[in-house]
Amino acid sequence: MDRAQKEAVVAELDQIFTDSGVVVVAHYEGLTVAEMTDLRQRVAKAGGGVRVAKNRLAKIALEGKASAAMGDLLTGMTVFAYSEDPVAAAKAVQDYSKDNEKLVILGGAMGDEVLNPAGVKNVASMPSREELIASIVAALGAPASNIAGAIGAPAANIAGILATLEEKAAA
């Protein structure tokens, strides 16, 4: 890898560390190519990405950032999973690590906050952006459906009473 390629990798990692809502660092030693591809697909499906880079280049990209302490996690064969959504990548990696014990979560960063493995697990247990939006929409829509049901209920009751009276009159 020549100097220009290294500078490009550092710039890409800088962009990842700056723009991502969450970055998860994990050891991937022992994962096969198929398992790594599965991890990449799961994280991509969640709306994130996976990047393997030399630890030295990642530490250079972390210099001067609030999450620079995450550099202490960078030993051995590390992989970065990241997403703009502060929960998506953490949730995808946590789920994958349950299925494959070769992937060991070391920690990560959420904004300026450096996370330990328990912190990543806590972030993964939070509802995602889509789940929060769905619950807000449901909460906003519930009063309208309750009002429609309350307005329609008396008419349905009257119709039922009229049908019963009509049956009694016919009999």
Image (cartoon, rainbow, N blue to C red):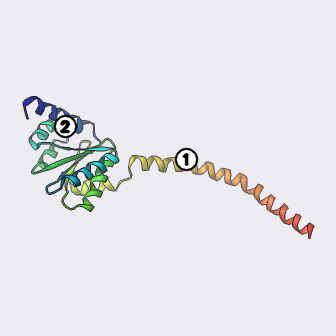
In the rendered structure, find residue 36 and report the number of the disc placed on it. none
Q: Residue at x 12, y 48 (%)?
A: 74
- Look at the image and tell me whether residue 139 can be seen: yes
Q: Amino acid at mark 1?
A: Leu
> Left or right of 156: which side holds 3?
left
Q: Residues within 10 Å of mark 1 (few under 14, many from 20)?
A: few
Name the spot of residue 38 as percent of width and height, x first. Answer: 27, 52
Query: Front-most of 165 and 66?
Result: 165
The quadrant the C terminus occupies is bottom right
Q: Quadrant of the N terminus?
A: top left
SS under mark 1: helix
Check disc 2 and give the amino acid type.
Answer: Leu
Q: Residue furthest bottom?
A: 171
Residue 105 sits in which quadrant? bottom left
Q: Which residue is mark 1?
A: 140
CA gap, disc 1 to disc 2?
Answer: 40 Å
Circle 2 is placed at which residue position?
13
At 72% from the left edge and 51% from the top edge, which residue is drawn?
Answer: 151
Compared with residue 112, is residue 148 higher up or lower down, i.e. above or below? below
Mark 2 crowdedness (10 Å alpha carbons): few <14, some 14-19, many ≥20:
many
Residue 39 placement, left or right of 135: left
Mark sitting earlier along the chain (1/2): 2
> Where does residue 22 sit, x and y in percent of width and height?
27, 45
Instruction: Relative to 83, say whether 98 is above or below.
Output: below
Q: Decide which of 136, 50 is in the foreground and name it.
A: 50
- Number of marks drawn: 2
Of marks 1 and 2, the one in the foreground? 2
Tag 2, which secondary structure? Answer: helix
